[in-house]
Amino acid sequence: MTEDFCSNLKLLCSHYKSTAEVCRRMEIHRAQFNKYLNGTSQPSRFVLRKICDFFGVEPHELDLPHDRFMQVAQSRANSDRDARAPDKPYAEKLERLQQQSEGRLDKYLGYYYEYHFSMTFPDQIIRSLLQIDMSGNDYYFRRLERMRPPNKEEKYKSRYEGTAMFLSERIFLVGYETLTHNEIAQTILYPTYKSRVSYLSGLKLGVSASDRREPVCVKVVLEYLGRSIRNREALQKCGLFNPATDAVARHIKEKISDATGYRGASLLATPL
């Protein structure tokens, strides 16, 4: 591990109140993270990806000379300020919507399994891992998908990030695919009126990953896992499932299906 890596990591942490807050939000043991900061231990590939996802950087960027990394970080900070500049009225309006959500999504913070019929493999159910979290006063979400189609060796991975808002008794998740940058997806959920969150249901609009890229709308169910989980174990349980599987609870399959069976309530748009 290089001295630049440690300096760059310390710079990223300096944007937060404390190292303890960073460790808590990333769910990394503080003593172990201090070893990364001091250069006495090197993070595994899995932990490194987790760190990079949290700070919004790429692994190779952490090894840049510190002076160069400071320039990259400053450039991104300037870009963020430009995105919120007054000459872009939509940014101000978006901030107003986010302000309306303050305190309304605290109850829903944590991790979920997300279930719906796949937009790319419509005869399969997909289980993905979703997190709702907050930064400052704003809420955001992350979604990780891992798919291996039936009778195929290759694996498909997708990662979505975006804003989460609570507006007029509905939860909105609007984000983009961060690996390919070719899709914006939206999920609208009913809130729960129970004291504890267990399941949420709604609709999800996105685009098929097939060559035709059809716009698709599916029913979706979120199963609450808790504020803290074992990420690796949770991800290992994600993937594609045959509708006849016992790995997905019956009431979830019924909720994401149409009235005729387990084909899913998918609506596909076709070009004129």
Image: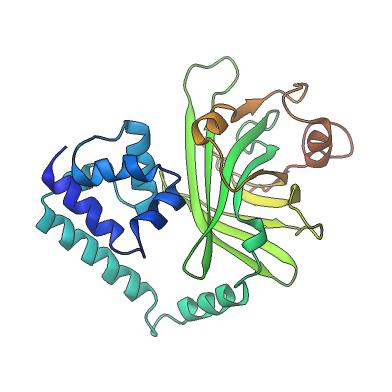
Picture quadrant where residue 213 is located: top right
Q: Quadrant of the N terminus?
A: top left
Please state the horizontal and vertical placement of residue 3, each as a whole percent of the image.
12, 45
Please state the horizontal and vertical placement of residue 192, each as a whole percent of the image.
78, 57
Q: Residue at x 75, y 47 (%)?
A: 198
Q: Residue at x 89, y 34 (%)?
A: 260
Is 230 placed left or right of 63 in the picture? right
Query: Which of the pair 209/57 is nearer the observer?
Result: 57
Q: Residue at x 33, y 74 (%)?
A: 81
Please state the horizontal and vertical placement of residue 126, each as a whole percent of the image.
64, 33
Picture quadrant where residue 120 is located: top right
Q: Residue at x 78, y 32 (%)?
A: 263
Is 258 placed left or right of 272 in the picture? right
> Would you place residue 261 above or below residue 30 in this image?
above
* Numbered disc total: 0
> Would you place residue 259 above or below residue 78 in this image?
above
Q: Residue extending furthest bottom? A: 86
Please state the horizontal and vertical placement of residue 226, each as a whole percent of the image.
63, 45
Query: Which of the pair 269/233 is nearer the observer?
Result: 233
